[in-house]
Amino acid sequence: MASRNVAPRSASAEVAALLESPEIGALIQHLQETRWTGRPGFPIRTMVGMALAKSMYALPTWAKLVRLVSEHAALQAALGCDGDVPSQWACYRFARKLRENGDALDACIARVIAELHRRLPDYGRDVAIDASDMPAYANGQRYLFNHGPERERFSDPDASWGHRSAVSTRRGGGFYGFKLQAAVCSKTGLPVAWEVESARANESTFVASLLDTAKARGFVVETCAMDKAYDNNRVYDECIERDCQPIVPLKRTPPIVRGEHLPPACEHGPWRFAGSDYRRGAAKWRCPTGECAPASTWVRADRLRPLIPRETLRWKGLYRRRAAIEREFGRLKHEWALLPLRVRGLDRVKLHADLTVLAKLVTTLERARRIGYQKHEGVRQAGPLRKY
Ligand SMILES: [Zn+2]
């Protein structure tokens, strides 16, 4: 593909391109119309550019961004603030304005996602849902010091203790903070829907709202891969009610140990899957030799024997692609500065997550417009170039 040889654009040129995109332009215009009175601030375009640049340069704080922009003539030109860089206080005020105009930001995210979806028809058909830890910018110590009095005021009262699983060489265990609950397309690796909650919230309670958000954003989610933590009847029912097939391994509960999930069997061996009827909500199983009478039977689908049976290659392939969400969490945290958190309070952490994902999505969209959607310039996607 000839377009592979396109030279990478500088980051400041990329910031300028994002600010020219119609999706971000509409956000700037909306915020201009609701411009708060009083202080004559910096142009909204400059402030939106600052917010996107923070994630693109993977900087944890506004203060560091302000210092970078102050020393960076090309970035000042891209942001339209030559020689007059907004202070970190101006950035804090703008962040508050964005929190107060959450609808405008949501609409902007929806526009970017819709345009990506138009270019990538497979985006959002098969998703993976999981939660990931976001340790708070605070410690959750219960006592002020060893054997000291109990703490009465917490620096981030919205954070709470939760559990995270082991990753690579890091042990699993308790952590204090928030969780990012997300649905990610397992083919393109792009986020579809996400929510931030205090760490103690049970992750399986977010499946319904994530799928509903995906639907509201125009996706028809056909399958949803999740790990064992999501193996319960409520999650199963919530997926089926939304015409989405859950791809979840079974926990080893007593009914599973007894083998209640196994397909029918006869003296010729375990029966083979022979297709599902989605309208009927049942899967057909057949005697391996066909000698039994009847030689096949319909089994009503439930959590133990779903319409895409766990024995099939399709289920195994979809479950393997669940790893897309782990990769996307890694990219957001390490390449787009989702972590470390340097804000406190659920509202601020939510805004930070929204801006991080928006910066990533709109960058992907701009690159797709310029050079086509592909593996390029560090936006490494489990992409459509790969054959599954
Ligand atoms: Zn038989």
Image (cartoon, rainbow, N blue to C red):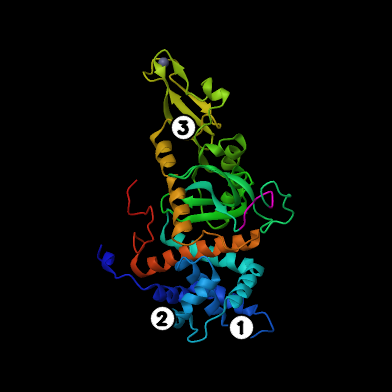
In the rendered view, would you say 76 is above or below 283? below
Residue contact at pointers 3 and 2, CB within 8 angstroms: no
Residue 294 visible to an observer of this rendering = no
Q: Which amino acid, by three-letter code, is at mark 1? A: Gly
> What x and y, as percent, mark residue 284?
46, 28
Front-lying residue, 326 or 169: 169
Report the residue marked by disc 3. 309
Does the numbered disc 2 mark a residue whose Cβ is under 8 Å from ligand 1?
no
Q: Give the vertical position of 41 relative to 298 (above or below).
A: below
Badge 1 marks a residue whose secondary structure is: loop
Q: Quadrant of residue 286?
A: top left
Q: Which residue is drawn at 62% across and 38% down?
A: 234
- Which SS type dominates the magenta stretch? loop
Q: Which residue is drawn at 41% across and 33% down?
A: 312
Residue under label 2, please give it: 74
Q: Does the magenta stretch include residue 43?
A: no
Q: What residue type is labelled 2?
A: Ala
Residue furthest top as drawn:
267
- Which percent across, then down, holds residue 144? 69, 52
The residue indicated by pointer 1 is 41
